[in-house]
Image (tube, helix red, strand yellow):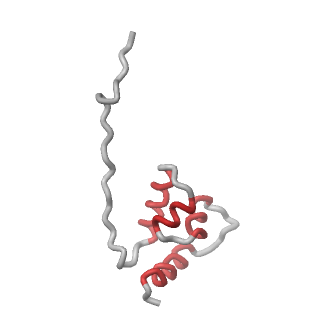
Amino acid sequence: MTTRKTASETSVGATPVKVVDTKKPRKWAEVVKEIAALREAGATVPEICEKLEVSYVLVNQVMLQSYKMAIDSEQVFERQEKMRLGIE
């Protein structure tokens, strides 16, 4: 008979927390990676939007990768980042 590991025998490593300066513009490529990570963790699109302060349209575009949603995501993101930071 095989033995099972008990909860005390297993270890779960903490995921490293990335500190982001919210007053500086972010890079779209980095935000896309964060969206993918949150999605894999089971977050919904509205939760991701709220947490990352990104519009629903951009998060949905990344999730669906649909040809029907043909927007220039990077350009839209840059504009929204300027609005979020009060630059424009």
Identify the residue at the far top of this view. 1
Number of residue marks: 0
Q: Is residue 42 left or right of residue 66?
A: left
Identify the residue at the far right of this view. 68
Q: Position of residue 37 (x, y in %)?
A: 45, 54
Seen from the viewer's position, the closer of residues 72 and 50 is 50
The residue shown at (29%, 29%) is 8
Q: Is residue 8 left or right of residue 50?
A: left
The residue shown at (32%, 61%) is 18
The residue shown at (34%, 29%) is 7
Q: Is residue 57 left or right of residue 80?
A: right
With respect to residue 2, does 54 lie above or below?
below
Q: Position of residue 70 (x, y in %)?
A: 65, 71
Q: Position of residue 1 (x, y in %)?
A: 39, 9
Identify the residue at the far bottom of this view. 88
The residue shown at (46%, 64%) is 51
With respect to residue 42, does 53 lie above or below?
below
With respect to residue 39, does 68 lie above or below?
below
Q: Position of residue 65 (x, y in %)?
A: 61, 61
